[in-house]
Image (cartoon, helix red, strand yellow):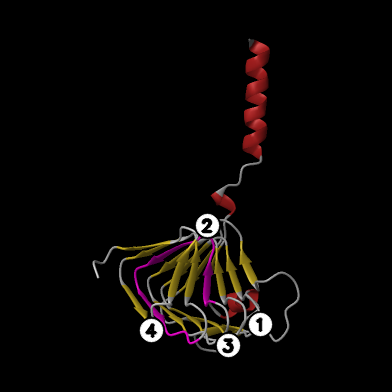
């Protein structure tokens, strides 16, 4: 009995020593310095544009790992403008109080969401290319408390492949194809309209 208890206690200690802790999580606030971390260009005022001319490697300029958070403050814009690459892959948390705009003519998604996207500001989706502005994976959640405007002329504004979109505010869409829910993707509208 003592040996079994000792083995179980040793296993619990060993497993807990490998557990991921939020203590080591990082939070990045979008500004000139963090824009460089995202491999973007800061306009000197308030906008970080992610649009490198060449990118080699897996899709995604900045890959937020689990528990990482990018905060976009009020008055600041994250502009995704590249025609060729998945520019932002989120597996952590993005909290937007400013503006996210995805406006390009590319063949791949501007924003791949497998984490949580909290919007308290505005998101403008105006992709004219052959891929969705936001490609939401089954692990993705979008919580909209601000405004999402979809004016894509190409593919869907949001291609929700099994994820959840919670809307407490406004989604302005230019057509019935602005949001595609597939593979059990859902849009839950809490605002009553």
- For mark 1, does the 10 Å Cα neighbourhood hold few (<14), some (14 to 19), or many (20 or more) residues? many
Q: Residue at x 51, y 88 (%)?
A: 45
Give the CA distance from mark 2 to mark 1: 24 Å
Give the CA distance from mark 1 to mark 3: 8 Å
Give the CA distance from mark 1 to mark 4: 24 Å
Considering depth in this image, is 55 or 70 the residue closer to the camera?
A: 55
Give the CA distance from mark 4 to mark 3: 17 Å
Q: Which residue is mark 3?
A: 105
- Are dots 2 and 1 in contact, CB under 8 Å? no
Quadrant location, the C terminus: bottom left
Q: Which residues are magenta?
A: 132-153
Q: Which mark is residue 174?
A: 4
Element carrying mark 3: loop
Considering depth in this image, is 69 or 23 the residue closer to the camera?
A: 69
Q: Earlier in the sequence, mark 1 or mark 4?
A: 1
Q: Which residue is mark 2?
A: 139
Q: Position of residue 184 (x, y in %)?
A: 46, 58
Q: Disc 1 vs disc 4: which is toward the camera?
A: 4
Whether residue 112 appears in magenta in the rendering, the answer is no
Q: Which residue is mark 1?
A: 84
Q: Earlier in the sequence, mark 4 or mark 2?
A: 2
Q: Earlier in the sequence, mark 4 or mark 3?
A: 3
Q: Position of residue 88 (x, y in %)?
A: 59, 72
Element carrying mark 1: loop
Q: Residue at x 37, y 80 (%)?
A: 173
């Amino acid at each position: 009995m003592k040996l079994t208890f000792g083995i179980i206690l040793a296993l619990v200690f060993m497993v807990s020593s490998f557990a991921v802790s939020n203590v080591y999580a990082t939070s990045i606030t979008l500004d000139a310095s963090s824009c460089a971390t995202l491999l973007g260009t800061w306009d000197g005022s308030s906008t970080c544009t992610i649009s490198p001319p060449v990118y080699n490697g897996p899709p995604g300029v900045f890959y937020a790992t689990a528990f990482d958070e990018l905060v976009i403050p009020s008055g600041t814009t994250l502009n995704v403008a590249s025609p060729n690459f998945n520019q932002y892959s989120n597996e952590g948390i993005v909290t937007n109080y400013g503006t996210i705009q995805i406006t390009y003519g590319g063949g791949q998604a501007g924003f791949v969401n497998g984490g949580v996207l909290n919007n308290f500001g505005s998101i403008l989706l105006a992709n004219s290319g052959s891929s969705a502005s936001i490609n939401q994976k089954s692990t993705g959640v979008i919580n909209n408390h601000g405004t999402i405007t979809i004016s894509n002329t190409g593919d869907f504004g949001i291609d929700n492949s099994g994820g959840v979109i919670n809307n407490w505010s406004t989604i302005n869409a230019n057509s019935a194809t602005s949001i595609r829910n597939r593979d059990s993707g859902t849009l839950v509208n809490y605002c009553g309209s």
